[in-house]
Image (spheres, rainbow, N blue to C red):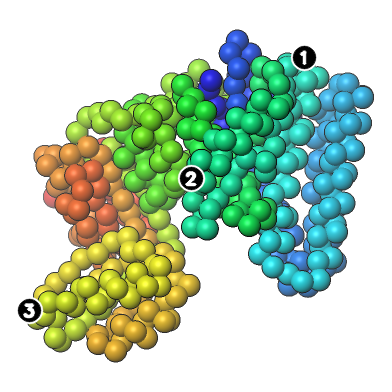
Amino acid sequence: MQVLKFGGTSVGSVENMKQVRDIIDTRAPKIVVLSAMSGTTNALVQIADATQMGEIATAYELVGELQKHYDDVLENLYTNDKIRAKVRGYVDEIFSSLENLTRSTEYTQAVTDEFVSKGELLSTYIFAHYLQQEGVSTALLPALEFMRIDKENEPDTYYIRQNLNRVIEDTGDADIYITQGFICRNYAGQISNLQRGGSDYTATIVGAAIQASEVQIWTDIDGFHNNDPRFVAETHAIPELSYDEAAELAYFGAKILHPQTVQPLREDNIPLHLKNTMDKDAKGSIITHRAQGEGIKAIAAKDGITALKIKSGRMLQAHGFLSSVFEIFQRYETSIDMITTSEIAVSLTIDNISNLQAIEDELSQFAQVTVDKEQTIICLVGHNISSDQNTHKLFQILKDVNVRMISYGGSNNNISLLVATEDKQRALELLQNYVFTQVVSA
Ligand code: ADP
Ligand code: ASP
Ligand code: MG
């Protein structure tokens, strides 16, 4: 069985839903994972924020605006009045539950999680009934009955496999099974989610659970590009990537994939195909074990990075200094992305700053600490990049941009640079130029 995931834009309008209907052929059974319609999760986050701040009137108004949008979708998507009326009943129920949530007296994370879970419930119900109207044999698989994360917020793979298979069996035969991306329950059974962009992750978790022949992620671009198309012109799709390359790029900011997406597929060697809903015949990108080509293949950037320089007069020939430093980060469950050392200092980066103050206080007991916020890691990925003869071109960047840290040689497929976020756009453009169009000025 194949698993196909369609993102927010792909189901974001009546026109695009019709495209999706054309892509899903019924020759073989499939599980289709859907995101919320584009803009919905952002709107729900806004409503949750307003509720949390006690701005009930604003929250209520935003719910009304969102409902109007859905009314238009129902009006234009369905030709069958009976199906439209049934869907309207469901959509109305969801919106009254949203209105009730805006009146939550005690605000907790669980309230936000419940707010944002509604987007995928809406899109899947609406789309499943559209397919039924079009004569496709369709059934809904409720994600909240099988998707679960454990205490570490990792997918509970055993539970998911058991329960997904049970839900499919209970549901009975259908050509197309539709389920919600992103949403799940936590270990305590409360509604939760796989973090923003998490529908990609749902698709690969489901793919591994049913041992799919392939997972396809359909989005609004023709595959994995060699640089971030939101910041750099003239990027292009890469036909083939390895799991390692894709994982590294996704982790370091390539928005096309949720950071954890490839991990569930790796072990079983299930291919991941990235495709464009708006141009279904474009080849897209295929991600497998195979590492193809040599040298730098793609560049990604991750914002929201904090750099710490930890300097100790006593580091000179002092063993134990690094382990004392790392022990603190371990205790505060804060992972380190980049690290460089010199004889008297170590510089490292983190993205989770929830325990920064406590970490700083502890480090200050034996070292001088400098903290720089608003940093960006730029990550260059490819096969055998450290030994590739063209890699030196990337160092041209040093004369144009202030590079705070470089990590080279940590692995054979990654080089990372740390720059101030304000220099990111320029750095990405220059790297595109130096690395891919090979214009190296004297
Ligand atoms: P979806 O809603 O389908 O999940 P996303 O917006 O999450 O879509 O991801 C697709 C977007 O990712 C593209 O429109 C593009 O702007 C952005 N993007 C960032 N980096 C890359 C990259 N390296 N390759 C392709 N797209 C990228
Ligand atoms: N709807 C969720 C989000 O906007 C999940 C996703 O689109 O993948 O983050
Ligand atoms: Mg996405």
Label 3 Cα crowd, 10 Å radius (few <14 / some 14-19 / many 20+): few
Q: Residue 143: x and y, percent?
A: 65, 39
In the image, taking residue 99 as reference, residue 376 lies left or right, namely left
First in residue order: circle 3 vs circle 1? 1
Using the numbered discs, state the Cα–Cα distance from disc 3 to disc 1 in whole angstroms: 74 Å
Q: Residue 265: x and y, percent?
A: 42, 34
- For disc 1, does the CB lie below 8 Å from ligand 1? no
Residue at the spot of label 1 = 135
Name the residue rendered at 17%, 77% in the picture: 320
Numbered circles on residues, count: 3
Q: Residue 407: x and y, percent?
A: 22, 57
Q: Which mark is residue 258?
A: 2
Q: Amino acid at mark 3?
A: Gln
First in residue order: circle 3 vs circle 2? 2
Name the residue rendered at 66%, 64% in the picture: 109
In the image, taking residue 329 as reference, residue 384 lies left or right, namely left
Q: Decide which of 268, 392 is in the foreground and name it.
A: 268
Q: SS class of the residue under badge 3? A: loop
Using the numbered discs, state the Cα–Cα distance from disc 2 to disc 1 in whole angstroms: 33 Å
Q: Residue 377: x and y, percent?
A: 34, 58
Label 2 Cα crowd, 10 Å radius (few <14 / some 14-19 / many 20+): many
Q: Quadrant of residue 177?
A: top right
Q: Amino acid at mark 1?
A: Gly
First in residue order: circle 2 vs circle 1? 1
Q: Amino acid at mark 2?
A: His
The residue mark sitting in front, 3 or 2, is 3
Label 1 Cα crowd, 10 Å radius (few <14 / some 14-19 / many 20+): few
Q: Which mark is residue 317?
A: 3
- For disc 2, does the CB lie below 8 Å from ligand 3? yes
In the image, taking residue 89 as reference, residue 294 lies left or right, namely left
